[in-house]
Image: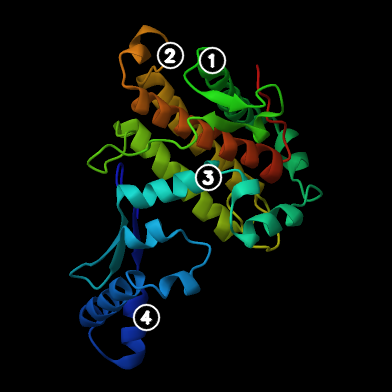
Amino acid sequence: MRHPTQLIYSSAIAHKLAAQRHVSATDLAVEIAELVTAFTLSQSADCVYPRLPKVVLQNTRVLTTSSGFIQFELKDPAIVGWLDFLIQPCSVAASAPCRDAINRVSTGNRVSTSISSTPEFHPKIFAIQHAHARCCSLLRLAHRAHLITLDQPDTDPRNWQLATPTSVPWLTPDLQLQTNHSTERQLINQLLMTLDELDELGEQVSLQTLPIPNQEPSSNPEQALRLATNLSQAFQAVHRDIQMMGSHGCAEPGDRRHAHLGLILATQRLLHLLLQNCLGIDAPSEL
């Protein structure tokens, strides 16, 4: 379910089950929502969803609508669970599926021929590459300004990790996202929607942190290009509206700056994945 600032998933499963059982979809939705809520708050949820951080499960509200739809609303701590998962180095990730995903990466199924050789796509490709390069530039600037410390900043940007801060202070003391500007919220939503659609496309790719199921690669490069375009546009909106470098950024609290830069790192990771793994196109760190 698309919302400019909230992250809400909507399911019609109650309608499908109600049709089979000849019962009210609305009543069944309420029953399912109550069961799901009770289960996600129980200890046994870890056994069923070992790859899903507990913080995500326990900070997801399960709601129902008058029309019988079930909605899953991710609270800010749940969103943080995904953001941390995105930027976490796989070497310290506890999940075996994460390590397995790297071994499954295939670079032989690239689709660059149909994309890069089509002139009408060239402006879109450049815009995506420009957004990726801008992310890299901002992270390097922040490193040189001692706002953050990148581990091995002279290596390939896909290997960059935050040395300091050791963990990103995503949340305020009242458990709200530090990155609470409307464009930042839209970028976060776009990041997670992109991951969802990559999963549905069956992309055999790895983000080094978030394992994607080992399925056949997508044969729809135009859709991958659309995802990359939407993500780059969401990033450019943030970059236009929020300046964390220079005199404007110095006025912001340190935790606020760190959270913003963590969001840029997550964006850089996913743009790199889309360009190189999904489209088979270079992801330049400078333009």
In the rendering, at what x and y percent does residue 82 appear?
45, 49
Point out the residue furthest to the left here. Answer: 66
Way the structure is coloured: rainbow
C-alpha distance separating marks 2 and 1? 8 Å
The amino acid at mark 4 is Lys
- Whichever of labels 3 and 2 marks the residue nearer the N terminus, that label is 3
C-alpha distance separating marks 4 and 3? 33 Å
On the rendered image, what quadrant is the N terminus found in? bottom left
Point out the residue furthest to the top here. Answer: 247
Residue at left offset 25%, top offset 38%: 173
| Mark whose residue sits in front, 1 or 4 | 1
In the rendering, at what x and y percent does residue 117 appear?
75, 34
- Mark 1 highlights which residue? 141
Residue at left offset 33%, top offset 61%: 58
The amino acid at mark 3 is Leu
- Whichever of labels 2 and 4 marks the residue nearer the N terminus, that label is 4
- Mark 4 highlights which residue? 16
In the rendering, at what x and y percent does residue 236 appear?
46, 25
The amino acid at mark 2 is Met
- Mark 2 highlights which residue? 245
